[in-house]
Amino acid sequence: MSQPQSPGLWYFQFMELNILKQIFFDKHKHWNRFKEKYGTRIRPIVIKEVEKFRGCGNPENGFKLFVCEGCHDVRRVPYRCKGRFCTTCSVGESEEWSRLLAEDVLQVNHRHVIFTIDEGLRDIFLLHRHLLKDFMDEAARILIEFFQKKAKVTPGIIAGLHTFGSKVNFNPHVHILVTMGGMTKKGEWKGYDFLPFEMLRKQWQTVVLKLIRRGVTEQEKKRIQPRLQKAFSKNGKGFYVHAPKQKGNVKEQLRYIGRYIRRPAIGLNRIEAYDGQMVTFKYVDKTDGVEKTESVTVEEFIARLIRHIPDEQFKTIRHYGMYSRRIKNLCKKVLAAWQATSRKWILSIKKTLRRKTWRERIVASGQKDPIICPHCESYYEYKGEVCKENGKLTIKVALCKTTKAYLERMIHYFSSQQTTQKEKEINSIQTKGTHHVCMPAL
């Protein structure tokens, strides 16, 4: 096997491909400065997720080893962080989730319903994040109660929380995927394709204002009462509820809506420029539908982005009605029995759903098979992998003595590089300290 290559080279090559990593972690050290400035005001989960993002794709945090069976070319595939802030991981997860969703739900028409709120109330949810779960629950409850009252059925609902607007500002709203119809008490499927927007908007307005009033302290309620009153009087018809009719293949509808529900706060393709101090990104202005650009300082850009990292264990995707995890399988069994007699097919043929491997996902995206050697067209063979345990790299798998020896050399190389880096940092701090002692006090 070839000698270990510089891990620093791999890491910075990856950083060059990801402009968001440059903004946070390049030579200007904007993220470190941000942490020093705002300290304890930053939620612990934010620091945890951003640090995971920093190490994503860095082989110093673990990798799998592949060797070409023809020319013996060595390939190291680094672990991904699978974090909630990482744009690279979230795009792949979004695509995979939407694929599984399209296979798992009922093969009937669904509507994509969006519940938004008055602009003056957004910051209340930023300051009181504990209200966001009830925010999602109430949106789903309004739809379930409408279907139960008007159509006498229970629909299936999947709700996704977005806290971001087009300008990456804090704008909490709920995206809902709802079946156009539902299951009756007799266990039969009944279609229903009507949503009264005006009524739902008014109900949603009332629900949100009551939710805020009961979720904050009396002192806070007095402080925000003028904003609540203004939000009520300014929106005579209620808050915005939108549900465009979907066209085309049901499965493609579901995959599209699924990707939309799981999308990250900002895609890398929207970041147009970064000069070390300012970030320029494009967005579609919802008032006129025109694409525009905005330039903000890096500090402002970081502040906007990290607000959208959810709290620890908070689920931004929730299931209700027939899709509730508690009764989903039971509902499917009942509907399967019904469709066998009615000859109306709304359930997919039962099959085992599994997540695609990293190789399958790469090939499905239209890229070259990563297991085929670009030099000789032979296949790469899996030989072993290294992972991090208790902060130290250890060999997890080594299929032969040669592989074990090679992985040991790699671990030694990484360790020596990290030690050298730490020594440089310590020397730098000591040097700064010496200069400070020699300088006169200001």
Image (spheres, rainbow, N blue to C red):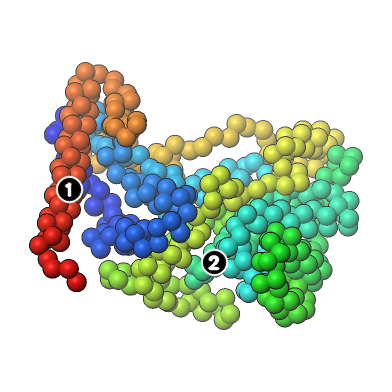
On the rendered structure, is 350 left or right of 149? left
Question: First in sequence: mark 2 or mark 1?
Answer: 2
Task: Identify the disc placed on residue 170.
Answer: 2
Which type of secondary structure does the marked residue at label 1 adopt?
helix
Indicate the position of residue 222 as horizontal and vertical percent values.
70, 71
Q: Which mark is residue 9?
A: none
Badge 1 is on which residue? 426
Residue 73, above or below 297: above
Mark 2 or 1: the one toward you: 1
> Is residue 386 or residue 135 the one in the foreground?
135
The N terminus is located in which quarter?
top left
Q: Is residue 18 visible?
A: no
Q: Residue 21 location in percent, x, y?
A: 33, 57
- What amino acid type should be assigned to the residue bearing mark 1? Ile
Where does residue 141 sit, x and y in percent of width and height?
77, 54
Quadrant the C terminus occupies: bottom left
Q: Is residue 416 visible?
A: yes
